[in-house]
Amino acid sequence: MAKSLMFMGTGSDVGKSLVVAGLCRALANRGLRVAPFKPQNMSNNAAVTADGGEIGRAQALQARASRREPVTAMNPVLLKPEQETGSQVVVRGQRRASMSARAYWQERGKLMPEVLGAFRELAQDVDYVIVEGAGSASEVNLRANDIANFGFAQAAKVPVVLVGDINRGGVIASIVGTFAVIDPADAALIRGTLINKFQGDPSLFSAGIDFIRKRTGVPCLGPIPWFADAAKLPAEDSMSLHTLPQNADGVMVIAVTQLPRIANFDDLDPLRAEPGVRVVMVQPGEAIPRDAHWIVLPGSKATRSDLAALRSNGWDTDILAHVRAGGRVMGICGGYQMLGRSIADPAGIEGNPGTSEGLGLLDVNTVLTPVKQLRVEQAVHVASGAAISGYHMHMGVTEGPDRGRPFARIGHDDEGAISANGRIAGTYLHGLFAADGFRRALLGNVASPDLDYEAGIERALDDLAAHLEKHLDIDALLAMAEPTGLD
């Protein structure tokens, strides 16, 4: 019977996802069969699974760390924010509804059987299921009907390790305070605490570890030093985009509009990895740099709304000026739809029914449809003949004369569109820049001939596992794991 252990955080962005990924790779390197699991996730950065659905990008990375194909059971409930107070609800990889935050909060408890079923499914053929909680474990106002943290842990009888981030300060209070505010029955599930993102001399925190152990009554593990190469791994939270390292000396400037509902932004990671490229995330209120060689309009979870935001920032004017000056523009998924003449949403899939005027840089029109296309694709870039391994994750059908000049071909089918002057490109293919040959064809002499992007991800995962093996008593963690509490 598989054993399981759950990592919850004192807050968001304490490093739970990274700890789980590193532990999964460490266990896989030990020859153990391991699978990641997150009952409920909220992210617009998603990945297509081997069984034809979608899950959070972090769980796909954790699956890769486990040396397993990603499947929908690893993240049975995914919330994809479409507006300030509402999200698309994805269950077992498929869109089920769009709901307000309040409606979902009232209904989410009904999803527990499907969450437990997915957990049971994963536990069938592994030695360990490593579970990640969501947000903060101390959100007692959200405890009723919870399926993401202690609600799941209680239902599945999974022991918990509580993770705190020392880098943001107040880690002792956040850990001890969590024990103080949660229900005693929930606190009884916590087998240990973990200090993450430590910088400096760890001996100076020994008294802090003793204090936490005495006040909580459970072991305090770590501290885990800061892992600098985390930036080489795909991020899940768009809040991290403005803090990612940039190549200040990059000779090619690629400007990316940071839209309110930006999605699948890990598409950009391979460009950031190029030493000769400087990726500029253009923030609201900022102008698109005039020295940009390329402008990339990224994916969006709410295309019409994000197009309105693009215009409110004046970026439409900047883009048109860039094109008049001879610059190039690429739109990916929602960004592709924005480049066309119109985006129609007759069924109100993204909000109120209606039609939005596009930027008019591609002679195509898009109609949003309720069926989401989720496919892993093997394509060929038409202009260069370079292979692209990517995926489709979109709702909508795009047609028009510029489709006669396809961006890529998938088998015998045309994909995407190119303008008559060849300087505007649109595609539904996510993950395209990870293809080394295509990226080199796109960037020309600026591209590094030695950069193997996918091999770099593997090295970073192995380095993360070695980092945990060095600084964390993994055997002590495994001793905290218990057989799954489900038949």
Image (cartoon, rainbow, N blue to C red):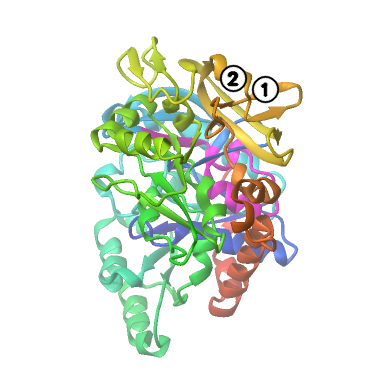
Q: Which is nearer the eye, 18 or 403?
A: 403
Left or right: residue 6 compared with residue 455: left
Crowding at label 1, few (<14), some or many (≥20) Cα neighbours within 10 Å? some
**Residue 33's x, y, as percent?**
71, 55
Outermost top residue: 346
Residue at image location 51% in from the left, 64% down from the top: 230
Left or right: residue 482 compared with residue 138: right
**Residue 210's x, y, as percent?**
36, 83
**Residue 487 seen:** no
Of the 4 image quadrants, the one containing the C terminus is: top right
Q: Which is nearer the eye, 487 or 368?
A: 368
Residue 439 is inside the magenta segment: no
Left or right: residue 327 compared with residue 417: left
Q: Quadrant of residue 446?
A: bottom right
As drawn, 426 above or below 200? above
**Residue 88 seen:** yes
Tell me the CA gap for discs 1 and 2: 8 Å
As drawn, 243 above or below 119? below
* Residue 414 disc label: 1
Number of marks in the rendered image: 2
Whether the residues at callouts 1 and 2 have beta carbons within 8 Å, the answer is yes
State the SS at label 2: helix
Q: Which residue is mark 2?
A: 403
Q: Which is nearer the eye, 230 or 431?
A: 431
Residue type, mark 1 in image: Asp
Residue type, mark 2 in image: Arg
Residue 64 is inside the magenta segment: yes
Residue at image location 37% in from the left, 37% down from the top: 319
**Residue 267's x, y, as percent?**
53, 45
The earlier-in-sequence mark between 1 and 2 is: 2
State the SS at label 1: strand
Give the magenta-colored segment's residue range.
55-81
